[in-house]
Every structure is written in structure tokens, then in C-alpha cells.
Image: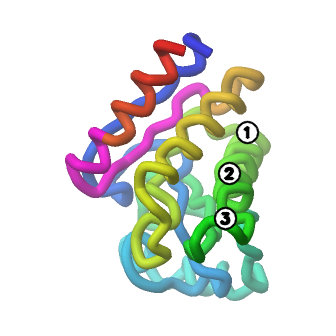
Amino acid sequence: MGKALDRIRIQTGDITKLDVDAIVNAANTSLLGGGGVDGAIHRAAGRELEFECRMLDGCNVGDAKITKGYKLPARHIIHTVGPVWQGGGRGEAELLASCYVRSLELAAANDCRSVAFPAISTGVYRYPKDAATEIAVGTVSMIIEQKTMPETVIFCCFDEHMAELYQRTVAALRKG
């Protein structure tokens, strides 16, 4: 697990500005843009993104689809639909983990050496931040332990509080 954790980076900032092979969009099922990081990515990428997304016919919760990055520094955008928090008894943890698994599978299949994730489902979908962070770090580290691609995974946090949660979670995993 230690080597996998060395491939994880945590930073605060605007995911639309990252020069990586792929950024992950916390999308809604329509894939046509929305609030938060979804709206920011659609605005930064430009109108062509919406046209490509219309051709994808939406996306199920827990799944992911890939598009070009258009006007973004990133070559690709991986759109994944996280679960809305409903108390934890409706398979939310499995669906959230699936978002990370499917996104990493698409990244690897499209030769993405670097991929950046936002904190999926922690905004308007109200997933508890602590639990979501544990799922994100645990799932990503497990997958990249077994795979060589992507080489680097960045958790791009909107604020310092979220970045600290990710740092604590990674540190706890390092201790074992």
C-alpha cells in the first residue's frame, strides 16, 4: 500500500486549471452541466463539451464516461455520477467507490498517466466529507496498488479543510 500512496497527491485549487491527462467531473446523470465543480468544468471547457455530452445519453450513478477536454489544459474529462446521501443505507458507499473504480478504469484505458479528482458527492449531494474521503483514498490506493496507470492521482480540494481531511486519511493509511 505504501508505494500506491506515494502516487497520490493532495492539493487545493481549481481543478479546471490543472495540466493533467484527465480531470474527473462530479456530474449529474444528464451530463449536461449543473452547479459546483460540474458547472465550473462545463464553463471552462466551452460549448463543445455540452454537444459531446448530449451524444453520451446520460450516465448512471456509480458509472463514468469520458469526453475530450476541449478548452481545458486536461486532455480528457471523466464524468462520474456520485450518489446523493440518503443516510447511508441505500448503497451509497458502494456507489461512491464505484465512481472512483470506473473513473480509474477509463483513465487507464485512455492512456492517462495523471488524473485529478474532486471530492465527489460532498457538495450538493451532501455525502459526509469524512466518510467520502475514506472511500476515495481507500478505493484509489487499492486500485493503483494493482495497476501501473494512472501513475499519479491528484485529489484537488476546493478548500484547505477538505485538503486536511485527505491528508489525514492518507496518513492514517500509511500507518496501517
Residue 60 at what x, y percent from top left? Answer: 76, 75
Binning the other alpha carbons within 10 Å of mark 1 as few (below 14), some (14 to 19) or many (20 upward) gives some
At horizontal 59% and vertical 76% (from top left) the residue drawn is 86
Q: Quick check: 128 above or below 175?
A: below
Residue 97, labelled with which disc? 2
Q: How far is the residue under mark 2 from the one under mark 1?
A: 17 Å
Q: How many marks?
A: 3
Binning the other alpha carbons within 10 Å of mark 2 as few (below 14), some (14 to 19) or many (20 upward) gives many
Residue 57 at what x, y percent from top left? Answer: 78, 85
Q: Quick check: 48 above or below 132?
A: below
The answer to which of marks 2 and 1 sits earlier in the sequence is 2
- Which-is-in-front pick, marks 3 and 2? 3
Q: Nearer the viewer, residue 89 or 128?
A: 89
Residue 153 magenta: yes
Q: Mark 3 — residue?
A: 92
Residue 152 magenta: yes
Residue 97 at what x, y percent from top left? Answer: 68, 51
- Which-is-in-front pick, marks 2 and 1? 2
Asked if the residues shown at circle 1 and circle 3 are in contact, with their CB atoms under 8 angstroms apart, the answer is no
Asked if the residues shown at circle 2 and circle 1 are in contact, with their CB atoms under 8 angstroms apart, the answer is no
At horizontal 20% and vertical 47% (from top left) the residue drawn is 160
| Colour approach in the figure | rainbow
Q: How far is the residue under mark 3 from the one under mark 2?
A: 9 Å
The answer to which of marks 1 and 3 sits earlier in the sequence is 3
Horizontal side of residue 161 vs 86, given as left or right:
left
**Magenta span:** 151-164
* Amino acid type at mark 3: Glu
Q: Nearer the viewer, residue 43 or 152?
A: 152
Local secondary structure at mark 1: helix
Q: Mark 1 — residue?
A: 108
At horizontal 66% and vertical 57% (from top left) the residue drawn is 93
